[in-house]
């Protein structure tokens, strides 16, 4: 921020502070005197005196000046592709489960043979009914096309049966009876 902006901000703050004092003085004078001219004169005098006092206070230099900051230049390498290295490989202990060895936990990795195949077992079939795991592709939970069609037909049948009944005639007759009974 340059000096002109800082001076403008300080001037606005000084005028706002002086105006608040002038309003407070005008309110205090209005409690003692009913003359509008006296109230306005007291407010103007308070505004003038407060502005003169605030202008006489010179701004001081900052106590903790900031050093000039020069941003460092960062060098980026543009890679065409992401390459996996030997450090990215982990050892497979058995063909149906993946275990981290003590060497893997310490940051040392070991390579596995290329002919070993990673087999993923479906663990979701072994979970109980009280399990909190979401079963996304459970074959027994997926409805058959016939069940889906029955659900849709049932839903469409309910909307036709539960359509709102036109009760305007009954309402009109009830209101007519009420009017007739009040006469």
Image: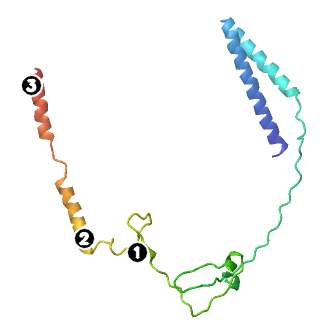
Residue with the mark numbered 1: 125
> Which dot marks residue 66?
none
Image coords of residue 92 (percent x, y): 60, 85
| Callout 2 secondary element | helix
| Callout 3 secondary element | helix
Foreground of the two, 118 or 76: 118
Position of 107 relative to 173 (above/below): below
User: Residue 170 sits in which quadrant?
Assistant: top left
Position of 123 relative to 85 (above/below): above
Disc 1/disc 3 C-alpha distance (Å)? 72 Å
**Crowd tier of the residue under label 1, counting other residues whose Cα lies within 10 Å: few below 14, some 14–19, many 20 or above:** few
Residue with the mark numbered 2: 147
Position of 28 relative to 94 (above/below): above
Image coords of residue 157 (percent x, y): 19, 60
Residue with the mark numbered 3: 180
Image coords of residue 21 (percent x, y): 74, 21
Mark found first going from the N terminus, 1 or 3? 1
User: Residue 11 sits in which quadrant?
Assistant: top right
């Amino acid at each position: 921020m340059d000096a002109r902006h800082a001076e403008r901000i300080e001037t606005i703050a000084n005028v706002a502070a002086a105006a608040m004092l002038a309003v407070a003085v005008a309110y205090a004078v209005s409690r003692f005197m009913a003359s509008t001219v006296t109230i306005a004169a007291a407010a103007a005098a308070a505004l003038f005196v407060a502005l003169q006092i605030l202008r006489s206070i010179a701004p001081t230099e900052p106590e903790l000046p900031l050093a000039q900051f020069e941003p460092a230049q960062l060098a980026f390498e543009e890679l065409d592709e992401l390459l996996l290295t030997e450090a990215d490989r982990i050892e497979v202990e058995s063909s149906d489960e993946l275990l981290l060895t003590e060497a893997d936990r310490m940051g040392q990795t070991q390579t596995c043979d290329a002919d070993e195949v990673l087999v993923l077992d479906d663990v979701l079939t072994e979970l109980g009914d009280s399990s909190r795991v979401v079963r996304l592709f459970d074959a027994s939970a997926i409805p058959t096309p016939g069940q889906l069609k029955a659900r849709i037909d049932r839903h469409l049948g309910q909307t036709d049966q539960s359509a709102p009944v036109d009760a305007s005639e009954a309402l009109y007759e009830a209101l007519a009876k009420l009017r007739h009974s009040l006469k």
